[in-house]
Amino acid sequence: MARLTNIQPAPVTGPAATLIYDDWYPALRTDRLRAGKLVTAMLLDIPLALGRLKNGKIFAMRDSCPHRGIPLSVGWFDGERVTCRYHGWEFEPCGGQCQLIPSLSSHDHLDATRIFASAYPCEERDGYAWVYIPAPGSGKLTQGPQRAVPELAKFGPRYRSAHLTADLPCNVDHGIIGLMDPAHGPFVHQAWWWRSRASIREKTKRFEPIPEGFRMSAHAPSANSAPYKLLGVYGQPVETTIDFTLPNRRTETIRCGDKWFSSLTTVTPVTSSTCRIDVIAAWNVFYRVPFVTPVAKFFGARFVRQDQETMIQQAEGLRHNPSLMLIDDADKPAKWYFALKQARLESQSATPPGAESKHPMDGPVELHWRS
Ligand code: FES
Ligand SMILES: [Fe+2]
């Protein structure tokens, strides 16, 4: 797995962000889940124990026994049941139902099956375990998640893919606005193969509202970026579309005739003050050219590492709670993000919850910036 471990996040982190519950978040790569083994992860300040049943299904439980709170991950998992190491209570891991309390005697009337450990909806997509995190205190999920599990768009059966992950020492809001920030490219991602500072030029991009997000409308990609130049070899027009949707997803699709590249980038709150960026990409471009996958991984990793390094430096500054600013037009996507998030939070706390939330954009707009 392309985890960027060579940079350790700063030990001290900055301010917390409000978190969006009742949605899907990627917890970890599923190649780490083997029958009989529990793996821990943290999502939205919730410690999780994930595993894979003998039948192949994956699950995610809160890593805490409902009896006395010891982590379930220090107990046993035989591929079917999770057993707590303190008093041996046994749980069915997908629903969390207690199956056995060894200490109960013939004099007890307690029905163990009425006790539940917290278990979360968990689905495997694109090699990730996606976990649905309900709002704290909302109890056991009586109805399933109302939202679809996110999935990387693919435009044909044959493709190559890659993924990478990096921990960011800042809160999820800073991770996300960094992800959508058009103005940092020439400074953070200076490299011969990408673009140079000297190539900064004025850009006009059209944005349109989409449900719970916004789209940078289909456009010919920046002529001053090398990977896009490379794509141009097919001689057909290249078109790229970038979407952002709540709570944390950026998708990019580049199409050129029957060639395509697709990526899904998420910035996931690990705690309220730290986050993690995950990128999954698939493409059928240069499908037959050997070494494209390792080369793509190398450049992708380098790109994400540049963002990671910058955010580690930023976190150092944010520790002192500076006042910040958002400017027009380059920070407009960040403003939309904050407004969309606010609308989602308000609709979730409304009674009844889930009322249609208001979109901050009235219609398509053009933004201008230099990058
Ligand atoms: S703490 Fe888990 S069984 Fe008692
Ligand atoms: Fe970046």
Image: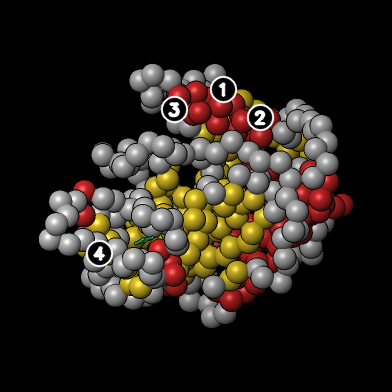
Query: Residue 356 at what x, y percent from top left?
Result: 41, 22
Q: Which residue is mark 2?
A: 335
For label 1, the SS is: loop
Disc sitting over residue 103 in the figure: 4
Q: Residues within 10 Å of mark 2 (few under 14, many from 20)?
A: some
Alpha carbon distance from label 4 to label 2:
56 Å
Against 128, residue 267 (above or below) is: above
Alpha carbon distance from label 1 to label 2:
9 Å
N-terminal of the pair, mark 4 or mark 2, is: 4
Amino acid on which disc 2 is placed: Lys
Q: Residues within 10 Å of mark 4 (few under 14, many from 20)?
A: few
Alpha carbon distance from label 3 to label 1:
17 Å
Q: Residue at x 45, y 62 (%)?
A: 71
Quarter the N terminus occupies: bottom right
Q: Residues within 10 Å of mark 3 (few under 14, many from 20)?
A: some
Q: Which residue is mark 1?
A: 360
Query: Residue 167 at what x, y percent from top left?
Result: 64, 59
N-terminal of the pair, mark 1 or mark 2, is: 2
Question: Do the numbered discs 1 and 2 sit on residues whose CB atoms are within 8 Å?
Answer: yes
Disc sitting over residue 348 in the figure: 3
